[in-house]
Image (cartoon, rainbow, N blue to C red):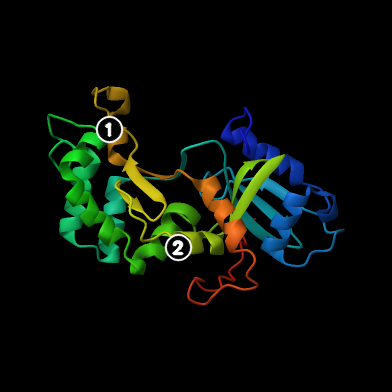
Amino acid sequence: MIFNKEITGYENEEEFATYLNGKQVGRVYPNFLELLNKLYGYLDYDDYIECWVNKSKRKADIYIKINGYVRGISIKKGVKNSVHNESIGTLVSFFRKLGIDEDIIKKFLYYQYADGTINGTGKTRISSSLYREKHQKDIDEINKVLNDEKYINAFVNRFVLQGNKSEYEVDAVIYGVVEDFIFITKEEVYYIMRKHLKDEISSLHVSLLTLQPMARNLNYNPKYEACRNQVQVKWYNISDNIIEVMAFYRNKKYLSSKLATGDNKKELSCC
């Protein structure tokens, strides 16, 4: 498969860190050089790179440090990429903080548990496809609210770039492996999510991101019961969307002020 090989995600992160750490900028593969130029601007080919895996396992999988400046990178590979997991309780609290109506939150909870309750105590559970068949109107109402332009920056930040446990956004998302990868910067993530904000999709989503329970546990297996209380966010077509950005967006010399999220000049000082 393109942009992939038979290693785990953790092994992939280690390979990226091992490849970059201690190298001079001028001695990396061309795709890495493009990434570094995007993240840092002008670099001298004699500059040395430090790189390490983030052991805390938040949004940044690896850190790259050049000339004292640190950039955080998220790395994905394979298919059906999960970009975020969060308890239903903290996500609902976030919805309320954004000002989302309680009726929409209630519909979201009905979707999450698909057992006729908002707390997962119902006796009969149904699949997501059957739930959509019976309650597509409710899902459409949720989607209309969640895909309001006023919320998109907050959702992209929480689901893709920063999460709910980190102080910093990642600076780019890599898709692939050391020998074969593509990437998208954080500004481009905001752009592509805004670009597809009004796409008509039947599943519960925010732009290109699908929201679903980590598991519906239709067979009542105790091992997976806790997964019903976790919301999983997936970016199913991440490689296609990065290629879309590469084809249309990177030819621009600057970011439109309408699409940019502001100049985040805060540097990581902890590493």
Q: Is residue 144 left or right of residue 11?
A: left
Tell me the SS state at disc 1.
loop
Quadrant housing residue 217: top left
**Residue 195, disc:** 2
Q: Position of residue 115 (x, y in %)?
A: 16, 35
Question: Residue at (14%, 29%) from the top-left corner?
Answer: 124
Where the C terminus falls, by quadrant? bottom right
**Of 150 and 90, the residue lying toward us:** 150
How far apart are labels 1 and 2 at the CA level? Answer: 31 Å
- Residue kind at label 1, given as amino acid type: Arg
Where the N terminus falls, by quadrant? top right
- Residue kind at label 2, given as amino acid type: Lys
Question: How many residues crowd around disc 1 within 10 Å: few (fewer than 14), some, or many (20 or more)?
Answer: many
Q: Is residue 195 left or right of residue 269?
A: left
- Residue for badge 1: 216
Question: Does residue 165 show up?
Answer: no
Residue 243 against residue 132 in the figure, above or below:
below
Q: Position of residue 109 (x, y in %)?
A: 21, 46
Residue that extends furthest to the bottom in the rendered view of this protein? 257
Quadrant housing residue 194: bottom left
